[in-house]
Amino acid sequence: MKKNVLIFGLISGLIITTMMVATSLSCYNNPEGFKGNEVVGYAGMLIAFAFIFVGIKNYRDRYNQGTITFGKAFKVGFYIALVASTFYVLTWLVEYYLFVPDFMDKYTAHVMNEARTSGATEAELAAKAKNMEWYQSMYKSPIFVILLTFAEVLPLGIVVALISALILKRRSRRLSGVLSN
């Protein structure tokens, strides 16, 4: 299982981090691009997390004689998502601290500009500013950068693992026959 999880987790992680680096650099160099890049970023996550499905199916068919329980399928999928997400988080740490250390300043400016142009009231702008100050304060600690970045990507991987496990679970023929009698 370890080899399967590492292979598909790293493939997924490579895809997701490539998309993240491309979109974050695009946003960093063009502050107007934040909105469109959010869609591209999450689409990239879905494409990358398709390898959770492929990894579970590969494990079921090649290493488990074509059968797998929901629990085992979810476990394989969860570990693939965890490897991919960890790859994503580590890449973001390198990118953020070495290449775009003022990313949160630019992102905050974008969020505040979006709120202003959408007609937010002064109270709404103040609340948004306070919320962004909280994020900026969280980004001062590498631990919180790690936690926030995992929170950005891992939940989607878990959902894909759950759905994939539901679709791919398959009992052995012998066990299925016993249960149906």
Image (cartoon, rainbow, N blue to C red):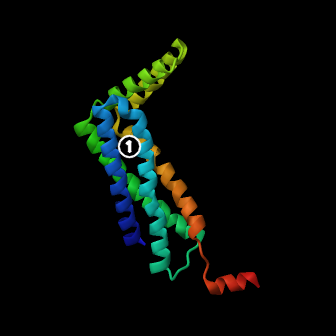
Which quadrant: the N terminus? bottom left
Residue 33 placement, left or right of 171: left
For this orientation, the residue located farthest to the left is: 98
Which residue in the structure is indicated by mark 1?
146
Kindly identify the residue that appears in the image at 46 percent across and 60 percent down: 50
- Snapshot quadrant of residue 173: bottom right
Q: Is residue 91 above or below residue 121?
A: below
For this orientation, the residue located farthest to the right is: 181
Crowding at mark 1 (Cα within 10 Å: few <14, some 14-19, many 20+): some
Kindly identify the residue that appears in the image at 54 percent across and 70 percent down: 72
Residue 60 placement, left or right of 180: left
Q: How many badges with numbers are in the image?
A: 1
Q: Is residue 111 above or below residue 20?
A: above
Q: Is residue 60 above or below residue 48?
A: below
Kindly identify the residue that appears in the image at 23 percent across and 38 percent down: 99
The answer to whether residue 147 shows anywhere in this view is no
The percent coordinates of residue 114 (x first, y second) are 45, 24
Query: What secondary structure is marked by label 1?
Result: helix
Of residues 106 and 70, the one nearer the viewer is 106
The answer to whether residue 176 shows anywhere in this view is yes
The percent coordinates of residue 35 (x first, y second) are 42, 34
The percent coordinates of residue 125 (x first, y second) are 49, 17
The percent coordinates of residue 127 (x first, y second) are 51, 19
Of residues 155 and 58, the one nearer the viewer is 58
Kindly identify the residue that appears in the image at 50 percent across and 75 percent down: 60
Q: Amino acid at mark 1?
A: Ile
Which quadrant: the C terminus? bottom right
Residue 100 placement, left or right of 35: left
